Amino acid sequence: MQDTLKILTILLSGAAVASIVFALYNWVVNNTALQKRFTQLVRQDRVPTDLSLSRTAGTHKVTAFIDILSKLSLPEKGWENSNAQLRFLRAGIRNKIVPQYYYAAKSLLTLVAPVVLVLFFYFTRPQISFQLAFFFVLLTAAVCYYLPEFLLHYITQKRIERMRNGLPDMIDLMVICTEAGMGLDAAIARISSEMARTNPDLAQEFYLSVLEMRAGATRIEALRNLALRSQLEDMADLVSMLVQADKFGTGLAESLRIQSDMMRSRRTQRAEELAAKIPVKMLLPLGLFLFPTLMLVLLGPAIIQIIETFSNQPVP
C-alpha cells in the first residue's frame, strides 16, 4: 500500500510540474509571437490580415484539459468585460488563450499542491498532529491560489514602470511631430511606429488608440481608453490635457512641452526619493551582517587573550 502511495505521489508531482511548465511555456511563446507580430505591423503601419495558425493548432491538443481546469477558477459570467479582463490588458496580455492558461494554472496549483503536501506528511511526518497538518494544507492551498495573482501584479507593475520612464521621451517626439505640422492622430501613429523598438509597451498602447480611432471611435474615447489601460497617473494627466486642447482649441505643441517638463521633473523627483531611501534600507543588512562581523574581527583577538589570561590564573 505504501509503495502504491509513493508511486501516486511521484505521478501527481510530475503531472503538476509538467502541466505548470507547459502552461508557462505556451504563455511565453504566445506573448513573444504576439509582440513580434505587433512590432512588424507597427513598422509596416497596417492591420493584420492573417494569423499564425501553427502554434494555435498545437494548443488544441490540450484545450479540453485547460478548459476544465480554467472553469474551476474563472470569475462569474461576463468576466471578459469586467475588471478581470482589464488586469490582463494592463499587464500587456492580449492573447485570448493566456487567461485560460492563467486560471488553469491557479486551479492546478490549488488542487495538486495540497494533495502532494498531504502525501508528503503521510510518508515523512506521520507523527504530525491533524490540526497542524490541516493548517499547512490550507496555507499551501491559499498561497498556490494567490501566487499567480502576485505574478500578474508584478508583471503589471514592471510594465507600468517602463511606460512611466519612457513617456516623457514619447511626448517630446509628439511635440516635434505637431510642430512639423502633423495632426494629433497622425502624430500618435508616427510616434507609435518610431518607438516600437525602444519602448514597445507605450508604442503598443498608442497604436491601439490609433486602431480604435480608425475603427470609428472618437478621439476622446480612444484617449480615455488609453489612460484606462495604462493605469498611469502621468498618462491620465496627458490625456486630460489632450482632451482639453481638443475641446478648446489651445496650442497643442506648447501644452505638450509643458507636460513633458512636468513629467521629467516627476521622474527626477522619483529618482531622488529612491536615493533618499537607500540609507534607511541599508540599516538592516548593516546591523545584521556587517557590524557583527566587524566587531568579531576587531574584538575577537582581545577576547581570546582575556580568556587565556583568566584561564591560566590559579584557582584560589
Image (cartoon, grey):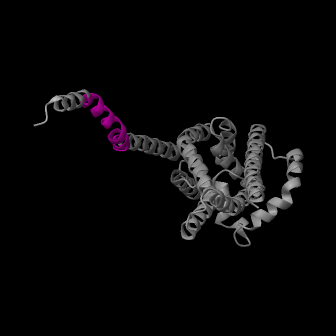
The answer to whether 75 is drawn above or below residue 36 in the figure is: below
The residue lying toward the viewer, choosing from 41 and 71, is 71
Q: Position of residue 121 (x, y in %)?
A: 62, 60
Look at the image and tell me whether residue 230 can be seen. no
Dividing the picture into quarters, in which one does residue 133 lie? bottom right
Q: Is residue 279 left or right of residue 12?
A: left
Q: Main secondary structure of the magenta part?
A: helix
Dividing the picture into quarters, in which one does residue 231 lie? bottom right
The answer to whether 169 is drawn above or below residue 184 in the figure is: above
Q: Where is residue 26 in the image (x, y as percent from the top left)?
A: 77, 48
Q: Position of residue 100 (x, y in %)?
A: 76, 59
The residue lying toward the viewer, choosing from 121 and 140, is 121
Query: Is residue 296 found inside the magenta-colored segment of the image?
Result: yes
Dividing the picture into quarters, in which one does residue 5 lie? bottom right
The answer to whether 304 is drawn above or below residue 252 in the figure is: above
Q: In this view, does 35 lie to the left or right of 305?
A: right
Q: Which image quadrant: the N terminus? A: bottom right
Q: Residue furthest front?
A: 316
The residue lying toward the viewer, choosing from 256 and 55, is 55
Query: Is residue 315 found inside the magenta-colored segment of the image?
Result: no
Q: Where is residue 120 in the image (x, y as percent from the top left)?
A: 65, 57
Q: Residue furthest left?
A: 316
Look at the image and tell me whether residue 156 can be seen. yes
Residue drawn at (25%, 27%) of the image = 301
Residue drawn at (85%, 58%) of the image = 63
Q: Which image quadrant: the C terminus? A: top left
Q: Give the range drawn in magenta.
A: 277-300
The residue lying toward the viewer, choosing from 142 and 197, is 142
